[in-house]
Image (cartoon, rainbow, N blue to C red):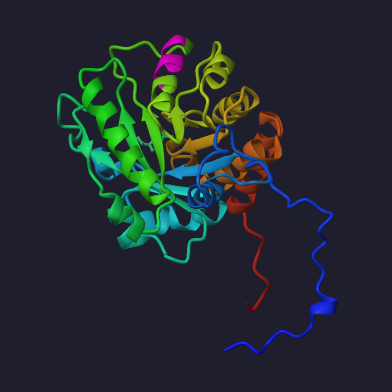
Amino acid sequence: MPEEDHSQASKDYRSEIPQRSERFFLKGSNELDWGMKNRLASIFDPRSGRTVMLAFDHGYFQGPTTGLERIDLDIVPLARWADTLMCTRGILRSTIPPTFRGGVVLRASGGPSILSDDLSNEAIALSMEEAVRLNAAAVAVQVFIGGKNERQTVRNMTRLVDAGNRHGIATLAVTAVGRELTRDARYMRLATRICAELGATYVKTYFVDEGFDTVTAACPVPIVIAGGKKLPEKEALEVAWRAVQQGASGVDMGRNIFQSRDPQAMIQAVRAVVHDGETPEHAFALFEELANRTASPATAPAGA
Ligand code: R5P
């Protein structure tokens, strides 16, 4: 039991100073509850307001994707440069060290595999109780606006939003574009806005060459871009740079990091673009420098 406090005279209430009340740094997120904001601050770095999410959940429908055959050997060493890891619960439990201190975004939808003729036929694949148990900061769900299973996947999202809001866990809506749909700003504006209107805490979408600034402007919550298929490193850095310059709050990048010829150098170069505002030219020079160091490590001293 604490001892009685007799030091009244020395107390300092500074009653003339109004209590500080800071606005939360993330777009559209000021009215969220403390737990949700705290989790979002483990995904987005409050210093830059942005995130580098390392995505390696691809196995949930395509098994051992190139570059993800051995997550223990190839992905775990990259985690120190990731603000957030995006993965399935199976990989998190089996392979990711629980000492990881950044945010974890868990894949929460699934069902069809690459052998199926309809990838959009997804169901919710994770309970919120399990997300809480695994200390997830957010859950991720695929939403196929305009697709065959539009209604079902929107419903998956809204059910996760309701459950997530009860527990203070964010919902990342991933706008998935079927082959039959055009990936342009008009479509991305529609898809991201619908997800935000129906409650997604933040939205992942693809960068588009024309008018991406209108996509971020029309979406009232943060947008992160998916990396997409593997590009030459300089082009991938350019896409990341153009996206953040046009209002994206970061990247959720997978193949362009883990399929790079030097994934450790690439994730550091992506960080330079996203957090430090480096140009793609500078970031690519950093990539080359780091990759060259790995290729020709300093000669070990004699007798070592
Ligand atoms: C896709 O199946 C996953 O949701 C990935 O997390 C997402 O597509 C990002 O990975 P990538 O940068 O390889 O497109």
Q: Quadrant of ligand 1?
A: top left
Query: Can residue 18 be seen?
Result: yes
Residue in the image at 23% along x and 38% along y: 110
Judge whether 199 appears above or below 20 on screen: above
Q: Nearer the viewer, residue 304 or 212?
A: 212
Residue 73 image position (x, y, % from top left): 40, 58
Q: Quadrant of the C terminus?
A: bottom right
Residue in the image at 53% along x and 25% along y: 220
Judge whether 16 appears above or below 214 on screen: below
Q: Quadrant of the N terminus?
A: bottom right
From the viewer's perspective, tell me whether residue 251 is left or right of residue 286. left
Number of on-image labels? 0
Q: Which residues are magenta?
A: 186-191
Residue 95 image position (x, y, % from top left): 35, 61
Q: Nearer the viewer, residue 198 or 120?
A: 198
From the viewer's perspective, tell me whether residue 79 is left or right of residue 111. right
Residue in the image at 48% along x and 28% along y: 231
Q: Nearer the viewer, residue 138 or 92?
A: 138
Q: Nearer the viewer, residue 194 or 207?
A: 194
Judge whether 285 appears above or below 76 on screen: above
Query: Can residue 82 be seen?
Result: no
From the viewer's perspective, tell me whether residue 9 is left or right of residue 211. right
Is 57 magenta? The answer is no
Residue in the image at 62% along x and 22% along y: 246
Residue 102 image position (x, y, % from top left): 51, 55
Assign the magenta stretch its main secondary structure: helix
